[in-house]
């Protein structure tokens, strides 16, 4: 099955073309299709994972004869290897200076500065035992690739950490660099059959309040701004000092009761 878009074309890794009859024309078409299929062959075999979740480079050497390497596959391989090895210097060499990240966990795309911070915090959060494991990798046209991945801890799959990333690369001289990353994370909420009911409710509310819906869709973060202002004007200057004073007051009361009980215990021991 083929999935096409204006600039990217992918082919399923399980799709095989077979000629119905050994006619010269069909045989010629079949060879052309096989050649085209070889260009878009998924790279998951080359990016096989070991039992600890790292990218198995030993398996890479074994399949070089059957799966030729390409600049794009090398970039993807080095990218995830750098994340697993916590090698920030090598990771920076794979990212274009204007690289941006669009993650579904964020409302807005991350700019160049935030992208660097994002990958740095990602490697810090992974620690020494969490590794990326690559599943399916499909290479498209014009230096694009889609990657199915998951996170594992010491070989065990971490729940709700599966996802898909779409990479757009660009040529910088003789080097291929990652210019844009689309990250689609697995949602921890699984509404199941209620998903369509929730969509129906949301659509009904958007249609009922079109002006509010337009403002919310333009800037979703604006919804929480009134609560932020309320916190800045009332909670932080008035309520927080009161809570701090209240906490310190009971701390002193507890210390006083401890001293009183210690004195009473000493007197009781002397009387006995």
Image (tube, grey):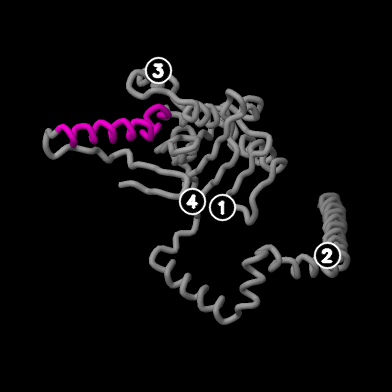
Q: Which residue is mark 2?
A: 232
Nearer to us: label 3 or label 4: 3
Give the residue drawn at x 69%, y 39%: 117
Q: Judge the density around disc 4: few (<14), some (14-19), many (≥20) Cα neighbours within 10 Å.
A: some
Badge 4 vs badge 1, beta-carbon distance below 8 Å: no
Helix or strand or loop: what does disc 3 sit on?
helix
| Mark pair 1, 2: CA separation | 29 Å
Q: Judge the density around disc 3: few (<14), some (14-19), many (≥20) Cα neighbours within 10 Å.
A: few
Give the residue drawn at x 65%, y 29%: 92
Q: Which residue is mark 3?
A: 61
**Residue 271 appears in view:** no
Name the one closer to the observer, 23 or 203. Answer: 23
Give the residue drawn at x 46%, y 49%: 6
| Magenta stretch in the rendered image | 24-48
Q: Is residue 187 magenta?
A: no
Give the residue drawn at x 49%, y 30%: 72
Q: Which residue is mark 4?
A: 186
């Amino acid at each position: 099955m083929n999935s096409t878009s204006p600039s990217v074309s992918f082919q399923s890794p399980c799709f095989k073309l077979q000629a119905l009859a050994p006619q010269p024309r069909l045989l010629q078409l079949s060879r052309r299709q096989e050649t085209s299929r070889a260009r878009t062959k998924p790279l998951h075999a080359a990016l096989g994972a070991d039992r600890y979740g790292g990218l198995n480079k030993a398996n890479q050497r074994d399949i070089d004869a059957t799966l030729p390497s390409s600049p794009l596959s090398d970039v993807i391989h080095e990218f995830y290897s750098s994340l697993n090895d916590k090698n920030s210097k090598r990771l920076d060499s794979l990212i274009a200076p204007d690289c941006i990240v669009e993650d579904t966990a964020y409302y807005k795309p991350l700019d160049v500065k935030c992208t660097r911070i994002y990958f740095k915090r990602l490697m810090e959060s992974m620690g020494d035992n969490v590794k990326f494991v690559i599943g399916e990798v499909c290479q498209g046209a014009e230096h694009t690739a889609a990657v199915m991945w998951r996170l594992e801890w010491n070989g065990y799959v971490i729940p709700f950490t599966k996802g898909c990333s779409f990479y757009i690369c660009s040529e910088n001289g003789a080097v291929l660099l990652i210019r844009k990353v689309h990250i689609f994370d697995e949602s921890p909420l699984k509404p199941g059959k209620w998903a369509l009911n929730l969509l129906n409710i949301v659509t009904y509310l958007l249609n009922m309040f079109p002006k509010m819906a337009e403002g919310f869709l333009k800037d979703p973060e604006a919804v929480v701004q009134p609560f932020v202002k309320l916190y800045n004007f009332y909670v932080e200057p008035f309520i927080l000092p009161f809570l701090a004073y209240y906490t310190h007051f009971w701390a002193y009361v507890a210390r006083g009761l401890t001293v009183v009980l210690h004195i009473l215990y000493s007197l009781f021991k002397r009387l006995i």
